[in-house]
Image: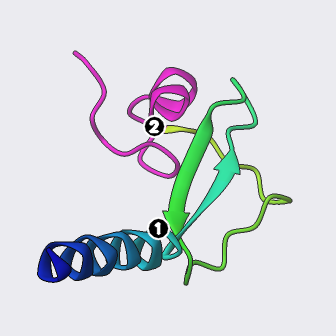
Amino acid sequence: MKRAVLFALAALLTLGLSGCAMKELTCDHCGKAVTVSQRSNMEEDWIIFCPECNEELFGDDPVVGDGRAEA
Protein backbone atom coordinates (compact mmCIF):
# COMPACT_ATOMS: atom_id res chain seq x y z
CA MET A 1 0.00 0.00 0.00
CA LYS A 2 2.81 2.37 0.87
CA ARG A 3 4.45 1.76 -2.49
CA ALA A 4 1.25 2.65 -4.36
CA VAL A 5 0.83 5.89 -2.41
CA LEU A 6 4.45 6.87 -3.05
CA PHE A 7 4.09 6.06 -6.74
CA ALA A 8 0.91 8.17 -6.99
CA LEU A 9 2.62 11.04 -5.17
CA ALA A 10 5.63 10.85 -7.50
CA ALA A 11 3.32 10.82 -10.55
CA LEU A 12 1.42 13.88 -9.31
CA LEU A 13 4.66 15.71 -8.57
CA THR A 14 5.96 14.93 -12.07
CA LEU A 15 2.74 16.18 -13.65
CA GLY A 16 2.87 19.33 -11.56
CA LEU A 17 6.45 20.08 -12.55
CA SER A 18 5.83 19.43 -16.23
CA GLY A 19 2.83 21.78 -16.15
CA CYS A 20 5.12 24.59 -15.05
CA ALA A 21 7.16 24.29 -18.22
CA MET A 22 4.48 26.07 -20.28
CA LYS A 23 2.90 29.51 -20.13
CA GLU A 24 -0.42 30.60 -21.53
CA LEU A 25 -0.87 33.68 -23.71
CA THR A 26 -3.98 34.99 -25.46
CA CYS A 27 -4.69 35.14 -29.20
CA ASP A 28 -5.21 38.79 -30.17
CA HIS A 29 -7.82 37.87 -32.79
CA CYS A 30 -10.16 35.33 -31.14
CA GLY A 31 -9.08 35.38 -27.49
CA LYS A 32 -8.23 31.66 -27.37
CA ALA A 33 -5.38 30.53 -25.12
CA VAL A 34 -2.04 29.94 -26.85
CA THR A 35 0.44 27.76 -24.97
CA VAL A 36 4.17 28.40 -25.37
CA SER A 37 7.28 27.14 -23.61
CA GLN A 38 8.10 28.81 -20.30
CA ARG A 39 11.56 29.55 -21.74
CA SER A 40 10.05 31.47 -24.67
CA ASN A 41 10.60 35.21 -24.59
CA MET A 42 7.05 35.76 -25.89
CA GLU A 43 4.95 37.88 -23.54
CA GLU A 44 1.32 38.97 -23.45
CA ASP A 45 2.18 42.40 -24.91
CA TRP A 46 3.33 40.73 -28.17
CA ILE A 47 0.84 40.42 -31.04
CA ILE A 48 0.02 36.71 -30.88
CA PHE A 49 -2.30 34.61 -33.04
CA CYS A 50 -3.36 31.01 -32.48
CA PRO A 51 -2.58 28.66 -35.41
CA GLU A 52 -6.16 28.84 -36.71
CA CYS A 53 -6.27 32.64 -36.76
CA ASN A 54 -2.78 32.81 -38.24
CA GLU A 55 -3.95 30.60 -41.11
CA GLU A 56 -7.17 32.61 -41.55
CA LEU A 57 -5.46 36.00 -41.49
CA PHE A 58 -2.18 35.32 -43.30
CA GLY A 59 -2.63 32.03 -45.17
CA ASP A 60 0.26 31.43 -47.54
CA ASP A 61 2.10 34.69 -46.92
CA PRO A 62 5.72 33.47 -46.67
CA VAL A 63 6.69 36.20 -44.21
CA VAL A 64 4.04 35.63 -41.54
CA GLY A 65 2.22 32.47 -42.65
CA ASP A 66 3.34 28.94 -41.94
CA GLY A 67 3.08 27.78 -45.54
CA ARG A 68 0.09 25.50 -44.98
CA ALA A 69 -2.44 27.46 -47.03
CA GLU A 70 -5.11 25.49 -48.88
CA ALA A 71 -5.01 25.66 -52.65
User: CA gap, disc 2 to disc 1?
Assistant: 21 Å
Question: Going 75% across and 67% down the picture, which residue do you hit?
Answer: 43
Nearer to us in this view, 7 or 13: 7
Determine if the magenta segment contains residue 70.
yes
Of helix, strand and loop, which one carries label 1?
A: helix
Label 2 vs 1, first from the N-terminus: 1
Question: Residue lying farthest front?
Answer: 1
Question: Going 37% across and 45% down the picture, which residue do you hit?
Answer: 66
**Disc nearest the viewer among 2 and 1:** 1
Q: Residue 20, how many percent across, how many down?
A: 53, 74
Q: Give the range drawn in magenta.
A: 51-71
Residue carrying label 1: 19
Question: Going 48% across and 76% down the picture, which residue do you hit?
Answer: 21
Q: Residues within 10 Å of mark 1 (few under 14, many from 20)?
A: few
Q: Name the dominant secondary structure of the magenta segment.
A: loop
User: Where the C terminus falls, by quadrant?
Assistant: top left
User: Where the N terminus falls, by quadrant?
Assistant: bottom left
| Residue type (three-letter) at the residue carrying disc 2 | Pro
Residue carrying label 2: 51
